[in-house]
Amino acid sequence: MSERAQRIRRTPEMAREEIIDATQAALAEMDFNALTVDAVMQRTGMTRSSFYHYFKSVDELALGFLGRLEGAIRETVDDWLNGQGSDDYLADTHTHLTTMFAAMENHRTGMMALARASNSSEQVHDEWRSRVIDYFIDLTARFIRQQIMLGRSKVENPDLTARSLILMNNALANDNLTREEPDDPAAIGKVSAEIWNAAIYGS
């Protein structure tokens, strides 16, 4: 009776989040490529068949991580890249990129799952590309154009510069998170900010 009541109280969103949480717990013990539905669902209070009410496959679980990661990254840099920074724009670059890398480190399990899933799932690859990479390329290109209008930047090709900076950040984050001894977000943020400031402001 209590088990049935527990199932009734679970909203679809709660069930999805519980499955994603269980996946994260499972990934602490195994690689994403070895993950199975059984390994995930045995960590929940739901039946194995319940999995397929919310996800088509294990790879699709990565999209659950994507939503969390996407939100965490946007929280650190969206306002800044939308023009709500301070007058100390060089320091802003350092502050926001450092907090972004810290957010990525906090979501290390999800990032690594996404990287592996995107190699085998076209849907995961396309969603990651659209919702994270292309989103931030467009946002950064607009940011650079704003800096040009403010007289702070002399970048000649904002789109290509933005693409280069975002792809660099993505590669840097993924490489760092797969290392046995990852660099501290403060160290990565400092170096990344120096490159961004040099590319955008020439300083």
Image (tube, helix red, strand yellow):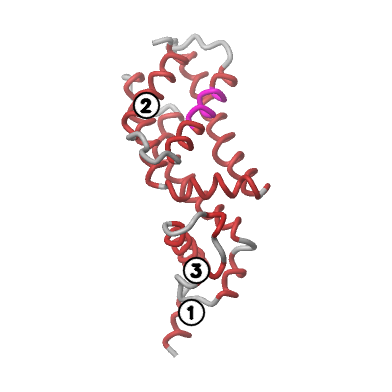
- In primary-sequence order, the first of circles 2 and 1 is 1
Instruction: List the residue tagged with mark 1.
Output: 7
Residues packed near mark 3 inside 10 Å, few (<14), some (14 to 19) or many (20 plus): many
Q: Main secondary structure of the magenta part?
A: helix
Q: Position of residue 115 (x, y in %)?
A: 55, 44
Instruction: Give the residue type that dot 1 points to.
Output: Arg
Q: Which residue is mark 2?
A: 85
Please give the name of the residue rendered at 37% of the width and 46% of the height, measured from the top-left corner.
106
Where 54 falls versus 148 (above or below)?
A: below
The magenta-colored residue range is 162-169
User: How far is mark 2 from mark 1, CA to CA?
Assistant: 46 Å
Q: Which residue type does callout 3 highlight? A: Ala
Residue that mark 3 sits on: 15
Q: Which residue occupies 49% across, 68% down?
A: 15
Amino acid under label 2? Gly
Percent coordinates x, y for residue 46 in the rendering = 50, 76
Q: Does residue 45 sit above or below 159 in this rendering? A: below
Name the residue nearer the viewer: 85 or 68: 68
Q: Are marks 2 and 1 in contact (CB under 8 Å)?
A: no
The total of numbered circles placed on residues is 3
Position of residue 159 measured from the top left corner of the image (x, y, whole percent): 59, 21
Q: Is residue 46 left or right of residue 77?
A: right
Kind of element beneath mark 3: helix
CA–CA distance in space, label 2 to label 3:
38 Å
